[in-house]
Amino acid sequence: MPDHARHGLESVAAIHDRAREAVGRHHRVIEHATTQIGQPRALYLLTAFAFLWMLWNGVGARFGLPIIDPPPFSALQCAVSLAALLLTTMVLTTQNRHARVSEARSRLDLQVSLLAEARMAKLIALVEELRRDLPNVPNRIDPVANEMKEPVDPTKLVEAIEKTIDNEHSRTTGP
């Protein structure tokens, strides 16, 4: 693998390592729990627990078992509601952190894209200059190359994108 490609991969790996190291202990615990609960076995275990709870408390008295939560199983309903609240909070916490990481990655992508665009504009300008300086190449004006050798202004690009989105939105929603 070429050195520049290896350096690029190492840089991306370092970014991921720093993001992973920046995660606090509480976030790691919550994300681990969210990952475990998001597995099919958790669904099977929770379903089996609820079924056994209802079976024990619904027909257990016939077999002499102590009844903890008689039908309509208000304790089970309370536990399920609390579990739903906790799970929702855990998922939102995980999603918020992932959204922050994704936003940072998007900003980095934009910066790299703008840098690449500026470099391409410079390369086009250099090629055009070289073409003009070579005696055996006919000198001609290329309006597209002249336009492309100017780097794009990110502010104007954002304004154009927003205007396009607004126009599209007004066209689809009507006046």
Image (cartoon, helix red, strand yellow):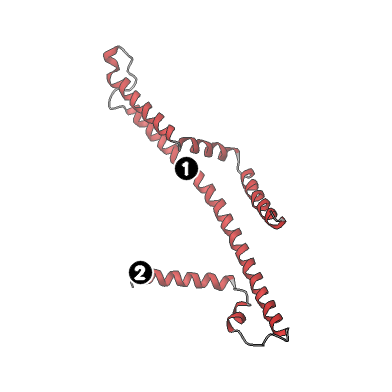
Question: Mark 2 falls on what kind of element?
Answer: helix
Residue 129 or residue 97, whichever sits in front = 129
Q: Position of residue 98 (x, y in %)?
A: 53, 48
Judge from the rendering whether residue 125 lies leftward or rightward of residue 54; answer left or right: right
Which badge, 2 or 1, is on the more N-terminal residue?
1
- Structural distance between the alpha carbons of marks 2 and 1: 34 Å
98 versus 168 height, above or below = above
Q: Where is residue 175 in the image (x, y as percent from the top left)?
A: 33, 73
Instruction: Write the residue at 55% across / 73% down.
Output: 156
The answer to whether the residues at label 2 and label 1 have Cβ atoms under 8 Å apart is no
Instruction: Write the residue at 34% across / 68% down.
Output: 173
> Which residue extends farthest top?
64
173 versus 11 height, above or below = below
- The label on residue 172 is 2
Q: Where is residue 121 in the image (x, y as percent from the top left)?
A: 64, 74
Judge from the rendering whether residue 103 lies leftward or rightward of residue 11; answer left or right: left
Residue 144 falls in image quadrant: bottom right
Q: Name the residue under label 1.
A: 91
Amino acid residing under circle 2: Thr
Mark 1 neighbour density, 10 Å: few (under 14) some (14–19) many (20 or more): some
23 versus 130 height, above or below = above
Amino acid residing under circle 1: Val
